[in-house]
Amino acid sequence: MAPTARSNKERPAYAITSVDHALRLASLLQLEGSTTVTDAAAHLGVAPSTAHRLLAMLVYRDFAVREGRHYRVGPLLARIGHSPGAMGRLRDIALGPMGRLMNAFDETATLTIRTQRLVRFIAEVECTRTLRVGHRTGMVFPAHRTSGGLAILAELDDDEVRALYDQAAEDEEVPDVHALFARLESVRQQGFALNNGLSEQGVLALGHAIHDAEGLAVASLGIAMPSTRFQPQMVRPMVAALKKASRDIEARLSG
């Protein structure tokens, strides 16, 4: 997750609350990929009926699309996501190393960011094989079910992880925290995360955290493949390549 910068900007004297709420919801969608009326209301501190009206306007203006109970990033907001900015810069810097990673193994390279308990795929370089992992960009998963999410969560200590999941909504999927602690400790000791079928049956992925100039984990780089193609001897060279690609990205982020 990109760290939140502390802003010294002052709130306008005649701020329009409804506009502020709509912009905050658009930012929430951009970061998390989806939300519900209940979650949006809690995020803004407003009644569900107010959140529903705001989301309906975002749908009307193509900032969001509604799919059942969930509101997801709409076509206009998706285009904005490709504009220059922190996420766009990260994506642009990562694409070169991701391409080299894909070429080295002919498996799909992925880039994810975390927001709270979710991760979102913001870029991928698909491999050339007929049977491959693809079409991940824009997808959102629980962080504890992906290699990228586990790699980033492992940067937190146990108290931070516990506090993170204590904030989860009642209808949100929450892992057994003690089992998650053990898994994250394994990630720390190994120096990488491995997910075999946690996020999607038949998919295996390796993940490694990417840090900014201050040492904060802002994203994760991954290699994803059909689990039927995985062999244990692949781990060492893939992890070495992931670490090198991550260092290359970090060097440019800090430059």
Image (cartoon, rainbow, N blue to C red):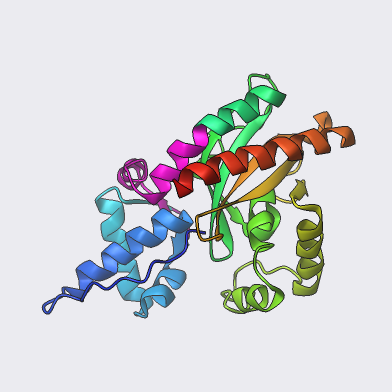
Residue 11 location (% of width, % of height): 20, 76
* 225 lies left or right of 111: right
In the rendered image, the vertical position of residue 126 relative to residue 245, given as above or below: above
In this rendering, does residue 70 appear at all?
A: no
**How many marks overall?**
0
Residue in front for this viewpoint, 168 or 85: 85
Q: Is residue 144 magenta?
A: no
* 235 lies left or right of 42: right
Q: Residue at x 29, y 47 (%)?
A: 62
**Please, which residue is most extreme toward the front here?**
255
Residue in front for this viewpoint, 64 or 21: 21
Q: Is residue 91 magenta?
A: yes
In the rendered image, the vertical position of residue 107 relative to residue 10, given as above or below: above
* 175 lies left or right of 230: left
Residue 241 location (% of width, % of height): 70, 35
In this rendering, does residue 77 appear at all?
A: yes
* 1 lies left or right of 54: right
Q: Residue at x 43, y 37 (%)?
A: 92
Q: Residue at x 52, y 59 (%)?
A: 1
In the rendered image, the vertical position of residue 179 relative to residue 114, given as above or below: below
Residue in front for this viewpoint, 166 or 69: 166
Q: Which span of residues is magenta-colored?
A: 67-95
Quarter of the image that includes the C terminus:
top left
**Please, which residue is most extreme toward the left here?**
14
Which of the 4 quarters of the picture holds residue 161?
bottom right
